[in-house]
Image (tube, grey):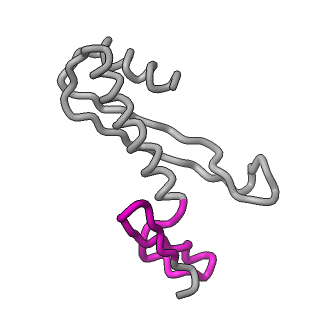
Amino acid sequence: MFGRVLCSARDHHFIVDGPVQNGCPGEELTPPEVFLAAVASCGVELVTVIAREQGARVGPVSITVTGAVDRGKQSRTDVTVFNSLRLDFQIAGTDGATAAQLVESFKRR
């Protein structure tokens, strides 16, 4: 089907659709949404790994990631890129200082 992509990684498969404005189905996740989900999953995984490496106890970790695209202010003319990304971390089961330190460690990686 035009605009629909079967993606495979190891033994896992999922569908990605191009956006409706490109004449694609837009029913499944779109490439930008997959990218944002990948950034969020990387952050959650790394924060928990860093906490374990540092002996810090944490509860559930979640990240809300928001991307902004301003088509009138693109840094490139040949492709559309995100103008900004914002990651909001929620780290339960620890104090604010430890949570902040874990986020800083994530940023350095």
Q: Is residue 2 magenta?
A: no
Does residue 53 lie above or below 31 as drawn? Answer: above
> Is residue 86 toward the left or the right of residue 95 in the image?
right
* Residue 21 lies in the magenta-colored region: yes
Tally of numbered tags: 0
Of all residues, the one furthest to the right in this rendering is 77
Does residue 70 lie above or below 28 as drawn?
above
State the residue at coordinates (39%, 69%): 13
Picture coordinates of residue 63, whole percent (x, y): 36, 39
Which residue is rendered at x = 25% and y = 16% of the image? 56
Q: What residue range appears in magenta?
A: 5-31
The residue sitting at the front extreme is: 10
Horizontal placement of 12 versus 17: left or right? left
Residue lying at 50% horizontally and 74% vertically, measured from the top left: 17
x, y percent for residue 109: 51, 26
Residue 43, percent across and down? 41, 36
Residue that protrudes farthest toward the top in the picture = 97
Farthest residue, direction bottom: 1
Residue 21's quadrant in the figure?
Answer: bottom right
Along the line of sight, which residue is nearer the eye, 107 or 92? 107
